[in-house]
Amino acid sequence: MNISERLAALRREMEQESIDIYIVPSDDFHQSEYVGEYFKARQFITGFTGSAGTAVITKNMAGLWTDGRYFIQAEKELAGSGITLFKSGEPGVDTIEQFLEKELPSMGVIGFDGRTVGVNTGKRYAQIAAEKHGSVSYHSDLIGRIWNDRPQLPMGKAFLLGEKYSGENTTSKLQRVREEMKKVSANIHLLSSLDDIAWLLNIRGSDIAYCPLVLSYMMVYEDHAELYADEKKFPEKVLNELKKNEIFMKPYNDIYAAVKNINPTSVILLDPERVNYTLYQNIPKKAMITERENPEVLMKCIKNDTEIKNTKKAHLKDAVAHTKFMFWLKHAAGSDDIVTEISASDKLESFRAQQEGYLGASFAPISAFGEHGAIVHYSATPESGATLHKGGMLLTDTGGHYWEGSTDITRTVAIGEISQREKEDFTLVARAMLRLMNAVFLHGCSGANLDCIAREVFWKERVSFNHGTGHGVGYLLNVHEAPINFRWKEGNVPAQVLERNMIITDEPGIYIEGSHGIRLENELLVCEDETNEYGQFMHFEPLTFVPIDLDALLPERMTEEERDMLNNYHRSVYEKVSPYLNKEEQEWLKQYTRPI
């Protein structure tokens, strides 16, 4: 079926269920950022392949809401589908809630698969429907009814992350979580977020592309816990480790019946942003629910010293691989060799694969040449992929999972001589990245306080970029990890204070549609600085050590302080990476980290 046929089939199901508006989010049953093939319902019904977006279908209209990272991509992929693009956050563009308020008829019904919608979102939909004297229908997976060749749920094996990598055993983590439960008098903690469960149990898996997680739910009690997952995925060694901690296996889908059977006198701790609406609605009405962020979220964001020590090892391996790639790229691209976006990405992956302990990519790689760089989350295909040539830039946003941790790095590299405008834009991005990386601040600051340090140089030129400047990074978990970020716009909750041993990216960019895109990204470690009468000062320590392409830089456009920042950074790059390179690569790196 093409997209029009799929929409027609969905509308027939809507009519049968008396649903006026049907909502299809990007989420799986766990509110994960990335989802497995089984859960790509929104992609199935719209044809849009980006990782973020929500489809809304009425009897005579279909719309897709997505954010600024995907505007260009969505316009191209939706062309001719009859689906309208709603650019979230743009002036004059209704939110989904505003659209529902306008379009839902009196006594109308809003439909969605409640397993794919978070608690707070489901509540908002229900409130909108109630104001129209209508209701929500959250029990039916209408996409599943029409998706005849839907992929099966994955069956990859789970594995343990030993204490030499995790730095803390499950017994200790459970004890800390139960202490937080006691603070709110909860005797049950309901968990649905895959990364929180994986961190708590020190297990990893392969159920989601690029995220080493296991499809599962969990209920933590005062003296035991229940893990709802497919037991066939768990080797005996993992099962034995779970038993040591009084964790009992239950079938994956049994969680919904289990929640219905919770003792009505229970007090349940759950995170409304990380539990789905159907689970929430299954809880007995007399039970007391304490809604707050999962304690695991902040616990796993603040890495322990073992994790930090390991992460630095992972980043050194990644730096060696990426530096070798840059050396190869400078010599191969634009020569007689044919290098494409895809072959360049494959080459970078091959350099990573040579590193000991490499487990795979930490997210879908971005390899974008020339005008493709302006598409923030561009994905090259054999049909769209460009061939590299002199006079352009290649933007690669990639990362790797290692036993010692996860990496995320973006570099934009000039192929031959590039234009003055491109060099000016590159220098602007480099200045922004360096200034934030070298920030010193008082404890108590969040990423919302510091984001303008990077954006200031953009705003002075009356330009900006349509994404956050940085995000937290998990340890062999999700590469985008809550609750920290660099983002100047206020969110739904107060921004998280930056604490020692948190890891956050620093990735400003500029995107000129039809011409070029530039982004530079380092990971930063939050560190304590000196303490004096003004309080505890903090600073960042770079974890990423890969050169910034001097061929694309205009030093005269930088302040003396900014040049010193770059020179100091490049000195560290050479000292750390050069011992792992051959002689020719060393000479090249020496040239590309020379003082400016």
Image (cartoon, rainbow, N blue to C red):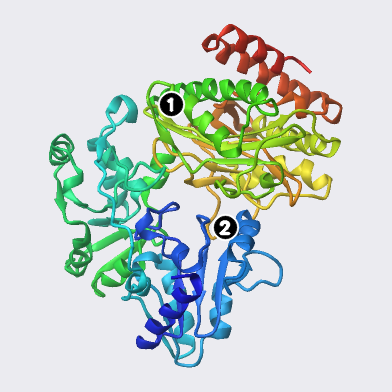
Q: Label 1 belongs to which residue?
A: 353
Residue visible at 75% across and 21% down in the picture: 564
Residue visible at 70% across and 29% down in the picture: 334
Picture coordinates of residue 300 (x, y %)? Answer: 39, 40
Pick the residue in front: 154 or 239.
154
Picture coordinates of residue 17 (x, y %)? Answer: 35, 85
Picture coordinates of residue 420 (x, y %)? Answer: 85, 35
Picture coordinates of residue 351 (x, y %)? Answer: 49, 24
Q: Residue furthest top?
A: 583
* Residue 339 shows in the view: yes
Q: Label 2 belongs to which residue?
A: 491
Look at label 2 and name its amino acid: Gly
Q: Point out the image quarter for the N terminus.
A: bottom left
* Residue 226 shows in the view: no
Q: Point out the image quarter for the C terminus.
A: top right
Question: Based on the displayed image, in which of its 4 quarters is residue 279 positioned?
Answer: bottom left
Observer-side mark, 1 or 2, equals 1
Question: Based on the displayed image, in which of its 4 quarters is residue 505 positioned?
Answer: top right
